[in-house]
Structures are given as structure tokens and as C-alpha cells.
Image: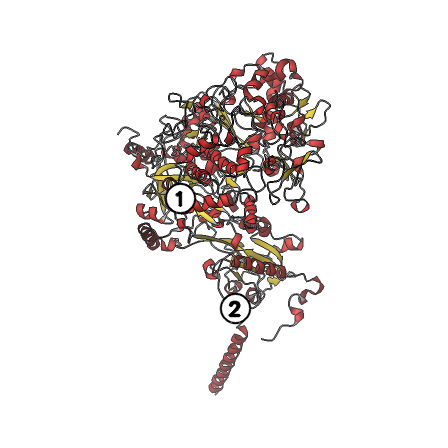
């Protein structure tokens, strides 16, 4: 679900094909019949944005039929934990959890906690708000629990306030009938999928769920994934071979760029970016952001080692390892709020690398207007992308809405080296780092990102060298001493990897994160990567073929942390350390040797912690994790069916309609996610939804997606003739019924309209798109790939012109996957007529005075 | 036609330099339509692309067919109610009417589990045992390699085009710019370096398998049995034996439906098979003509 794996991850999909050859059943739940559906045993077309209703139905099916893996659920999940009596569910409050503050559109989360805890998210943090992240969201690595124990539990799972019973009540109305009414998936088909999942789980069998941006690109994205976690925890499919929830990360190093983040609110290894609350006190930062128990209990060692790696001798125990040098997160600086600040001229400079926001971001016109308000813009790319050319070639220039001579932005285009022209690593979906070696030198002025960042830093430091201003100290004190090679002084990428790995005081390499200390005696750029350069060897560059090792392939690349290929793999054995079954054995306890064995993976557990281990009084860190608790990153060592903290929109996934939907929420009075991040401003109108006046103006569901043949915003595929010819033009996919209803001709042109923009596309009439019967009416959908723009060998309108900015507040990701539109035959108007055409739609929808 | 001498045909013609017959087994049942084969082929063989040809409307296929500039081609077939550019009007109405019927009667659409299939298949030159293209080539540009594959030598081909209509599969094609004929070489240059062809190496699901033909045929038989047992009733091997009209092929296929569905001829024949009798007839005709002429001349003599 939420993934078109055959098209977007064709190389990884070979293993799905292989699994199928060995008897696995492949089921695909997706709005369209795609190349993945073509290879699946079963396809269920689903209305976009209703995944939680579907998965909630699966949860209900499991619970009503008592199909859960009982021993696993009791011992390894928080099903038995009692929640505070003041907690109120969406079933009680018509779609809202307790603690909602309407004026903030945010929750006070104190009522969501485990009974007997102080209910605070982490010390001192009582409310989560979308515009304050840092400490508030990613920092929420856990609550304070004495010895890692939830204070109140009911092992019979009967207490009405235990998680198991709350879960049961929360999903009781998600029946197959309701699933059909909301999602459009016929109940027989739904039941077939739910039953297949159950029948292939338990001691002897496991099942995996794959997802990708088809889940994340929603205002409920994080909660969709949470719903899958609940399914998999109930069925015992986490931490076991053949199980899991596989987040198919993308093109080509999205996982790596989250681990060593390009995100504004986290530091390497998911350490939160400090918030002003913690002031300059390193210990206070640790106190605010780390629980006492579990693997995050050693946050101080991870953070101190990172600060030592960055500031070397300037980071001492006495100055909190130069903690005060770190920037502070003072608000929401995620992508869209950043663009809005540019629009408002509060941000005046922008460096764009590995991104093409004019094509790849929602509401393209708003993106371009933001760029036009900058003083300067630097674009580094392998080709001149639309973002670099916005000032002379854009739909707004064409329509006369913007004029080149009125754009003051100074644009610098810097040619970038391609991945084949530089050393580095890619991190795949399995957290596996694979090193790649430079094949050829970059041409002419093309340079790597590493070259750019290093030499930019070097030049800034040279300019500041004589400064005595304290604010320049963090830059001047950085360890900025990477060796360079060749005529272009390319920094040595392995030297960066070594810094990430970390060293002991004697200069030797750290070999595992457990060696990191909080006293300044170790350095480590990213604690989760400690060991990637163990023994002075680039472990990520190991390429032993799978034919020369077992199927786990521990000697191919290196998986963080500690080369663990399956996370939480302690769960592959029962509480006593015995495999759940011989067929599915993976990690098990040897009483004689007093250690964990495995088929070849590194146990994701302390290697000599006995299954019967009980933490002593006052235990902290990993010492506080029981010998039978596999989920070591949580302070209680349990898998969370119910997330008492860490999410801004509730402890349990709940069905909400998308921001723009032709359908009313059938379950609750609350139509859409109450915490979603909206931006009400003239540049970002929202199409009216069901129940609002004007909803009939945009009657169809619009979904955007990708094709195998193109790469994201097209910079690397529309410019390559052999790829460009495979999908040369933007097209929309519609069902024969919608085509008949709107007079769309296969192979002809269509104009697709939202309140933001109108674009044109060739028409593909296909039975792979079906109208869905939802709540006794027919919902039509229009499908649009998003790869096109005005540069390159093949050009076309960008689908993202049509979309609004509306975000999942947990992660500030926009709802690309579903909105509403109108579609009509023929090409769109040209010149000034285009703006009038869209304005007329807005007037008809009541969004603009007539 | 008399049997050719052993010495004149592969492998005898290569003597000790002959290699086992190499070929492709393309298992379309696991083709995911990624077109990596098309791209890898064009990259390796430096074949020009035509990004300006535009949207064809043939499902996800925009390179249309095998030709001088497409030596691997992935076909996409949407089954049940194919909608093509040529037949847009009629089928739209039909399809909508059908769906209305389904809605009213509650009869199954593919939501209920039947029907819709999206077949994908990577086509290529078949490297025929009896290759008509090679037999009609007057310059010797087309030749049979030591691997029993059929290759055009670009520096010998004079662009006469005789081979183009000779091919029973429509594989051979002249490039507009230079008039010469180009087609799959089964990566002859790579084979000589003990490397597999580019398309097979790029294929992520092993839909394109390269190897010794005898091995591939055994593999294909096993695969067909497995699929048949699993209920794929129309699954069939195409060109997998020696008994067909081209004497067998170096590139053969596992199809999930009849060859016609994929645009492949169900019963291809070596178009030069009949040349013997044609030449015989031509000889008789020529003799008659000559006789007539002689008579005419005779009559015309004073």
C-alpha cells in the first residue's frame, strides 16, 4: 500500500518477484492498477487518502476474530499498559482526542500518557505545537519511567483502560461494510486481504508491508504508517525474518539524507536540534530530550561525541562540549514555511542543491513568487533546471503575470558533478550503506557537493579569520581539516566517513556506538553510524557477493546501527529466548554460552543479556531494558500499539478525509485532521470540500505520482534522450466512464483545473483507473505524473501547479497524493486568458468575489 | 533445394572456433515493464533516441516497435477492453456502457477480481536458425557468428533493404539518416569479451535471461510447467523448439497469451523457404520466354 514498488523501486522489486516465485502472495492496494498491480496476485483499487480506514478495518478484523499473535502482543507490545483515566478517544469526542486546544489547533498531550506517569511528554514540555519542533517532536524519544516499567499494567488485557481495550473500542466501527463505504474497496476483496494477512502471520509465518510516499504525502501520513505498525505488532510481524514495515526510501539517498539530515530540526542520528528552552546548558538539553531508559538513555554520550567531532579541542567537559555553538530552532523552518518567508521577504537568500522546487513542490506558482522575492539564489545542479530558469522561462512569464525585468533576484547557476563523478555512499531502505567510487572526473567547472560545502566553509573561515566577534567562534572553531586530492582539491570522502564513524582518544576507530562516552574521550559524527569504519576499514565498501555468504549478506555494505539487518530482531525469539518456530528462527539465546546467537545478523540487543534479566532499582539506559523487551529504542522496551507521545495528532490513527475531498467523513463530525497545517493566504486557496459551497466546481479526486521512466522533477531524465523518449509528454489517466462523462478523447488533450492553476495534458483513457462507489455515489479520479517542466528535451506543464500547501504537522510533508480538480477536454488557455480562466473557477467556487 | 554442406553452416563453418549457440529466453511473466533493457541496449550500442516523437497513446509504450533505433522493445497490452488511439470513439462508449451495466447488475468489474491484465513483454530479434535476412543479403553484411547469432556489419551494409521484407517478424529496418539496416547483435562485442548482453544484465527481475540455448530451453520448460500448474492456462513458449517455420530461434519467449496478442506472428516462416520452387518456376518461365524469343527471332528472320 502507498507504494508502486515495481515502477519506483524496480531493482528492489526483483526480491518481491523472487518471493512470489517461492510462494509468497503479493497484494496491492492502490488507487490505480499500476505495473505493481500487474505483478500482484491481487489488486484492490482504493480511494486516495482513505488508507487509515482500510488499515483500521484490518485492525478491527484481527481484534474481532482474536487473530492477534497473543504471546507476542502481551510480552512485546504495550497492549497491557493502563492509560490515564482522563484520556478520551475520538469515539467519545466525535473525531477529536482529549486535550485539543481549538485556537492553537494543537493538542495538550498530558491526558494521553501511561497511568501513573506525570503525563509530560518529556520534562518541561506540556504542549506540542506545529511551529515549534526540535525539542517538541523529534526530541520526544521517551517518557521518564522508573526502571523502564510502565507503572500500571494488566496482563489479562481486560482492563477497560488498557491499550488493548482502548484499541478495540477505537476501531470497533471500522467494519468491512464501513471500509467499503469509505474506501471504495469491495468488502469481499477487503476480507480476502485481511484474512490473507492473518493466515500468513503467527509463529510459522510472517508478512511484510511495503509503503512509500503514497503514504507519507498526506495530512495523515505519519498516522497511516502508525496504523500499519499496529497491524504488524498485533500479528507479530516486527523484528522477524520476512516481516516488517518496509519504508521504500527513494531517489537515491533519501534514507541517508535523513540519517545525516538535511532537515532543519534534527542533527545526525536523529538527535534533536536544540530549542531555545534548553538555553546554553548541555545537561538541560539532554534532560529535555532523552529518556532515562532504553538506547536513548545514552543521548549524552551520542551528543557529546558529535560535538567533539565537530569542534575538537574547543569542545570540553567544562563548556558543555561547546553545546552553545549549535544553532537553535526557533520555529518551523521546514520547506513550505521557508518558502512563505521568502514570499514575505523575511528570507532573502536561498541555496538549492539536489532539489527543483519549481517542479517538485506543491503550488508551483507560489514557489516561483517566493524565488522572485529573493535577493539572491544559488542553484547547483547537473543541468539548468526550472528553478534556475524561473526568472525568464515560466508559466507566469508566459501568461504575463510575472515579468523578467521586474524580478530582482540575482541567480547563480553552479554546475554540479553527477554521482558517477564523486565518491560517497547511498543508504537504502534497509539502512544499508553502499559505497560508490568515482568513475570519471567531473567535467569543466562541475564539482561535487562535498567540494562545494568544504571550500565554501574554508573561504568563509578565511574571511572571518581575524574576527574577534564571539558569534564567529562556532565557525572558526570547527574541525575543518579534510585532506584534499587532485587538481580541484576534492575533499577525501572517506575522511568524512571516518569522522562520522568516530575515534577514541588514542586515535583508534570506534567500532560500535556502545563505546561512546559522555566525558569527551570519544568523537563520533553520527552515533548510529559508529562502526562503519571499524578496524580502519570502510565497511560500507564491502562487496562480497550474495553467492558467497548466506541470505542475510552481512558482508555486503554495512547497515546502521552495528550492521543490524533486521531491527528489533530480539522479537524473533519468544520471551525465553527460544525461536518462535524453527522455520522462522533468526536470533535466539544460548543458555550454555550465555549469549545470543543468530543466523548471521547482529542481534539488536545486548549480546549477553539473558532473557530473564530484570533491571535493578534505579537502572538507566540499556540497563533498564528487560531481557524480554525487544524494542530497545523505547524507554519501556515495548512496541507501541498506542503512542502516548511523539505525535502531534493523536495516540491512535483515525480516519480523516483529506484537506480537499468530495466526500464527507463518514465516521466523525471532524472532517479532516484537526492538526493539519493550513496556510490561508491569497496565493494558496483551497478547493471547497464536500459540504462546503462550491465543492461541485472541483468534483474529481486528483492524484499525482511518478513513472519508472522519469526521475522526480525530471532534471536527470527529461534531459537524457534515452529516457526522455520513453515518456515524452505529460498525460493524465482517466477511466472510460469519466472520459465519456466529460467528453475526453484518448490521445487528445485535457485541461485540469484547481483553484491554484490550470494545466494541460494528453489523455490516457484506461481501465486501469476505475470509478469507485463510495457511500452510494461514484467518485472519479484523475491521475497525473508530476515529472514535467519547461526545460529539458521533453517539456510539459507541471502537475504540482495544481496542488495546495497543506501539511502533516508531525513532519511538515504536503498532501501531494490527493486533492480535487475539474477536467475538461482541450488545451488550456494561453497568455493572460489563463489567469482569467482560473480566476473564473475561483469565483464559481466562491473563493473570490465576483 | 539441396542440403547445405556441413562445412558451410554453423558450427562446422567455424571449425574449432565455434562456440555454443547463445540466446535469450525472455520470460514475460515476470517483466515489470521498466524498459531498462531498451535503455541499456541503446546506451551500449549507441543508438539514437527520438524524444520528439511524442505521446503515442499505446498504453505506456512510446517507442512503438522494434526498428533500426529500437533493438529491444517493451510492449504493453492492457487486456479486457483495449483502448487505442485508432478506435477511441467507439470503445469509449462501449466501455462506459459496459460499466453502467456492471453498476446496475452488480456484475463483476476487476474490483471483484477478474479480468484486467497488463501484459508487458520485451521483444527482440529472434536470431533465427533459418534466417531469411541473412540468406537474401547480397553483400554479406549479414552473417552468422560463432555463437550462431545473426549480425549486420554496419561497414558492409549498403542499404539495399532486401532483408527488410524478408524478416518474418518485421525486425529489420533501415535508419532514415543513412539508409543502412540496424538490429540487435545479441551484443556480439560483449559476447566476445565473455560478457552478457546489455539488456540481460540490466533486467532487474531476470525476465531477460541470457545463456546457452540448450540450457535456456530446459529452464523455459520448467518455468512453463510451473506456471501451468499454477493455473496460467494460456501460458506458452514461443519459438522454443526447432520445429517451427524458421527452424528454431536463438531468442525465444514465454508468453501469457497467444502470440497475436503481443503482435507476434503465430506461425512465422522463413520467407526464403520457397525460393527453390520459386526459382524453379522462374527457370521454366525463363526457358519459355527464351523459347518464345527464339521463335520470334526465328520468325523475324528474313
Q: Crowding near pointer 1: few (<14 within 10 Å), some, many (20+)?
A: many
Which of the chains bears the disc numbered 1?
A
Q: Position of residue A758 (x, y in %)?
A: 36, 37
Of tags 1 and 2, the one toward the viewer is 1
Q: Secondary structure at mark 2?
A: loop
Residue ID for mark 1: A185
At 40% from the left and 44% from the top, the residue drawn is: A185
Q: Is A846 left, or right, of A548 in this rendering?
A: left
Q: Secondary structure at mark 1?
A: loop
In front of the other: A323 or A755: A323
Residue ID for mark 2: B271
Cα gap from disc 1 to disc 2, whole angstroms: 52 Å
- State the count of labels: 2
Q: Is residue B271 above or below residue B281?
A: above
In front of the other: A93 or A527: A93
Residue at the farthest left position = A850
Which of the chains bears the disc numbered 2?
B
Q: Position of residue B223 (x, y in %)?
A: 56, 57
Residue at the farthest right position = A506
Q: Is residue A838 above or below residue B223?
A: above
Amino acid at each position: 500500500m502507498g507504494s508502486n514498488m515495481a515502477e519506483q523501486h524496480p531493482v528492489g522489486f526483483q526480491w518481491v518477484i523472487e518471493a512470489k516465485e517461492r510462494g509468497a502472495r503479493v497484494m496491492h492496494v492502490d488507487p490505480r492498477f499500476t505495473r505493481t498491480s500487474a505483478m500482484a496476485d491481487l489488486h484492490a483499487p482504493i480511494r486516495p487518502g482513505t488508507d487509515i480506514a482500510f488499515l483500521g478495518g484490518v485492525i478491527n478484523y484481527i481484534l474481532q476474530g482474536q487473530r492477534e499473535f497473543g504471546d507476542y502482543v502481551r510480552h512485546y507490545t504495550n497492549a497491557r499498559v493502563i492509560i490515564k483515566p482522563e484520556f478520551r478517544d475520538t469515539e467519545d469526542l466525535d473525531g477529536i482526542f482529549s486535550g485539543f486546544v481549538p485556537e492553537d489547533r494543537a493538542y495538550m498531550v498530558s491526558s494521553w500518557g501511561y497511568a501513573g506517569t506525570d503525563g509530560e511528554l518529556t520534562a518541561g514540555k506540556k504542549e506540542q505545537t506545529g511551529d515549534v519542533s526540535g525539542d517538541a517532536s523529534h526530541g520526544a524519544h521517551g517518557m521518564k519511567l522508573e526502571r523502564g516499567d510502565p507503572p500500571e499494567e494488566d496482563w489479562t488485557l481486560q482492563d477497560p483502560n488498557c491499550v488493548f481495550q482502548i484499541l478495540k473500542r477505537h476501531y470497533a466501527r471500522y467494519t468491512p461494510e464501513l471500509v467499503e463505504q469509505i474506501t471504495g474497496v469491495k468488502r469481499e476483496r477487503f476480507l480476502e486481504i485481511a484474512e490473507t494477512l492473518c493466515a500468513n502471520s503467527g509463529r510459522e509465518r510472517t508478512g511484510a508491508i511495503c509503503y512509500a510516499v503514497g503514504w507519507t504525502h498526506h495530512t495523515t501520513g505519519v498516522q497511516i504508517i502508525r496504523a500499519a505498525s499496529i497491524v504488524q505488532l498485533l500479528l507479530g510481524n516486527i523484528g522477524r525474518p520476512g516481516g516488517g514495515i518496509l519504508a521504500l526510501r527513494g531517489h537515491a539517498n533519501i534514507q541517508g539524507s535523513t540519517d545525516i539530515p538535511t532537515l532543519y530540526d534534527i542533527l545526525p542520528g536523529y538527535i534533536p536540534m536544540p530549542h531555545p528552552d534548553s538555553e546554553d546548558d548541555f545537561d538541560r538539553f539532554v534532560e529535555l530530550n532523552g529518556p532515562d531508559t532504553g538506547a536513548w538513555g545514552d543521548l549524552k554520550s551520542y551528543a557529546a561525541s558529535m560535538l567533539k567531532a565537530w569542534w575538537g579541542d574547543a569542545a570540553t567537559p567544562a563548556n558543555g562540549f561547546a553545546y552553545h555553538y549549535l544553532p537553535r530552532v526557533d520555529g518551523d523552518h521546514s520547506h513550505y514555511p521557508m518558502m512563505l518567508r521568502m514570499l514575505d521577504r523575511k528570507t532573502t537568500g536561498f541555496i538549492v542543491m539536489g532539489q527543483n522546487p519549481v517542479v517538485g513542490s506543491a503550488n508551483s506558482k507560489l514557489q516561483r513568487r517566493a524565488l522572485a522575492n529573493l535577493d539572491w539564489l544559488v542553484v547547483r545542479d547537473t543541468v539548468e533546471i526550472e528553478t534556475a530558469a524561473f526568472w525568464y522561462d515560466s508559466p507566469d512569464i508566459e501568461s504575463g503575470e510575472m515579468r523578467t525585468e521586474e524580478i530582482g533576484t540575482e541567480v547563480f547557476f553552479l554546475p554540479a558533478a553527477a554521482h558517477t563523478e564523486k565518491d560517497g555512499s547511498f543508504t537504502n531502505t534497509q539502512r544499508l550503506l553502499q559505497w560508490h567510487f568515482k568513475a570519471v572526473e567531473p567535467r569543466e567547472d562541475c564539482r561535487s557537493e562535498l567540494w562545494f560545502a568544504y571550500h565554501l566553509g574554508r573561504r568563509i573561515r578565511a574571511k572571518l579569520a581575524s574576527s574577534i566577534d564571539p558569534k564567529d567562534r562556532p565557525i572558526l572553531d570547527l574541525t575543518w581539516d579534510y585532506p584534499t586530492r587532485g587538481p580541484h582539491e576534492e575533499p577525501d570522502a572517506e575522511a568524512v566517513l571516518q569522522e562520522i564513524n568516530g575515534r577514541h582518544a588514542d586515535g583508534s576507530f570506534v567500532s560500535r556506538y556502545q563505546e561512546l562516552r559522555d566525558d569527551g574521550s570519544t568523537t563520533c559524527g553520527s552515533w548510529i553510524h559508529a562502526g562503519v569504519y571499524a578496524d580502519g576499514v570502510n565497511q560500507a565498501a564491502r562487496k562480497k557477493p550474495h553467492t558467497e555468504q548466506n541470505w542475510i549478506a552481512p558482508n555486503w555494505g554495512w547497515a546502521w546501527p552495528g550492521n543490524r539487518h533486521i531491527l528489533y530482531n530480539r522479537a524473533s525469539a519468544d520471551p525465553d529466548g527460544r525461536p518462535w518456530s524453527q522455520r522462522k528462527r533468526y536470533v535466539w539465546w544460548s543458555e550454555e554460552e550465555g549469549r545470543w546467537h543468530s543466523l548471521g545478523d547482529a542481534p539488536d540487543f545486548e549480546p549477553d543479556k539473558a532473557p530473564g534479566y530484570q533491571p535493578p532499582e534505579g537502572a538507566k539506559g540499556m540497563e533498564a531494558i528487560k531481557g524480554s523487551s525487544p524494542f530497545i529504542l523505547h524507554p519501556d522496551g515495548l512496541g507501541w500499539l498506542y503512542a502516548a507521545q511523539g505525535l502531534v495528532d493523536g495516540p491512535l490513527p483515525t480516519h480523516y478525509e483529506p484537506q480537499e475531498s468530495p466526500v464527507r467523513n463518514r465516521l466523525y463530525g471532524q472532517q479532516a485532521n484537526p492538526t493539519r497545517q493550513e496556510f490561508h493566504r491569497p496565493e494558496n486557496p483551497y478547493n471547497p470540500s464536500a459540504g462546503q459551497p462550491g465543492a461541485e466546481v472541483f468534483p474529481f479526486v486528483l492524484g499525482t505520482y511518478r513513472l519508472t521512466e522519469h526521475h522526480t522533477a525530471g532534471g536527470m531524465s527529461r534531459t537524457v534522450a534515452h529516457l526522455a523518449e520513453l515518456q515524452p509528454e505529460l498525460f493524465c489517466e482517466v477511466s472510460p466512464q469519466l472520459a465519456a462523462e466529460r467528453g475526453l478523447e484518448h490521445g487528445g488533450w485535457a485541461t485540469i483545473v484547481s483553484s491554484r492553476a490550470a494545466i494541460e495534458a494528453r489523455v490516457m483513457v484506461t481501465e486501469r483507473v476505475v470509478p469507485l462507489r463510495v457511500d452510494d455515489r461514484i467518485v472519479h479520479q484523475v491521475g497525473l505524473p508530476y515529472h514535467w517542466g519547461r526545460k529539458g528535451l521533453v517539456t510539459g506543464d507541471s502537475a504540482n501547479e495544481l496542488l495546495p500547501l497543506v501539511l502533516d504537522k508531525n513532519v511538515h510533508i504536503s498532501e501531494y497524493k490527493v486533492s480535487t480538480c475539474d477536467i475538461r477536454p482541450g488545451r488550456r488557455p494561453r497568455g493572460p486568458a489563463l489567469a482569467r480562466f482560473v480566476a473564473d473557477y475561483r469565483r464559481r467556487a466562491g473563493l473570490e468575489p465576483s | 533445394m539441396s542440403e547445405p554442406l556441413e562445412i558451410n553452416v554453423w558450427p562446422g563453418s567455424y571449425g574449432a572456433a565455434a562456440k555454443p549457440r547463445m540466446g535469450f529466453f525472455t520470460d514475460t511473466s515476470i517483466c515489470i515493464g521498466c524498459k531498462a533493457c531498451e535503455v541499456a541496449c541503446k546506451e551500449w550500442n549507441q543508438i539514437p533516441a527520438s524524444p520528439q516523437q511524442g505521446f503515442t497513446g499505446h498504453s505506456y509504450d512510446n517507442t512503438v516497435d522494434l526498428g533500426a533505433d529500437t533493438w529491444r522493445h517493451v510492449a504493453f497490452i492492457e487486456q479486457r477492453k483495449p483502448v487505442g488511439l485508432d478506435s477511441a470513439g467507439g470503445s469509449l462508449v462501449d466501455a462506459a456502457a459496459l460499466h453502467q451495466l456492471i453498476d446496475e447488475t452488480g456484475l463483476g468489474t476487476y474490483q471483484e477480481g477478474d479480468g484486467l491484465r497488463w501484459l508487458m513483454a520485451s521483444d527482440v530479434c529472434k536470431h533465427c536458425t533459418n534466417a531469411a535476412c541473412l540468406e537474401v543479403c547480397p553483400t554479406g553484411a549479414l552473417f552468422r557468428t560463432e555463437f550462431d547469432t545473426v549480425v549486420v556489419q554496419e561497414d558492409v551494409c549498403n542499404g539495399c533493404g532486401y532483408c527488410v521484407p524478408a524478416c518474418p517478424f518485421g525486425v529489420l529496418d533501415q535508419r532514415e539518416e543513412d539508409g543502412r539496416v540496424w538490429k540487435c547483435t545479441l551484443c556480439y562485442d560483449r559476447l566476445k569479451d565473455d560478457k552478457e548482453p546489455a539488456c540481460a544484465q540490466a533486467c532487474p527481475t531476470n525476465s531477460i535471461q541470457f545463456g546457452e540455448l540448450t540450457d535456456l530451453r530446459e529452464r523455459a520448460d520448467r518455468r512453463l510447467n510451473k506456471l501451468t500448474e499454477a493455473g496460467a492456462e494460456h501460458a506458452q513458449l514461443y519459438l522454443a523448439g526447432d520445429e517451427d517455420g524458421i527452424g528454431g530461434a536463438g531468442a525465444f519467449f514465454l508468453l501469457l497469451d497467444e502470440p497475436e496478442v503481443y503482435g507476434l506472428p503465430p506461425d512465422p516462416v522463413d520467407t526464403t523457404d520457397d525460393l527453390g520452387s520459386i526459382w524453379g518456376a522462374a527457370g521454366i518461365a525463363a526457358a519459355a520466354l527464351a523459347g518464345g524469343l527464339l521463335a520470334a527471332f526465328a520468325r523475324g528472320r528474313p
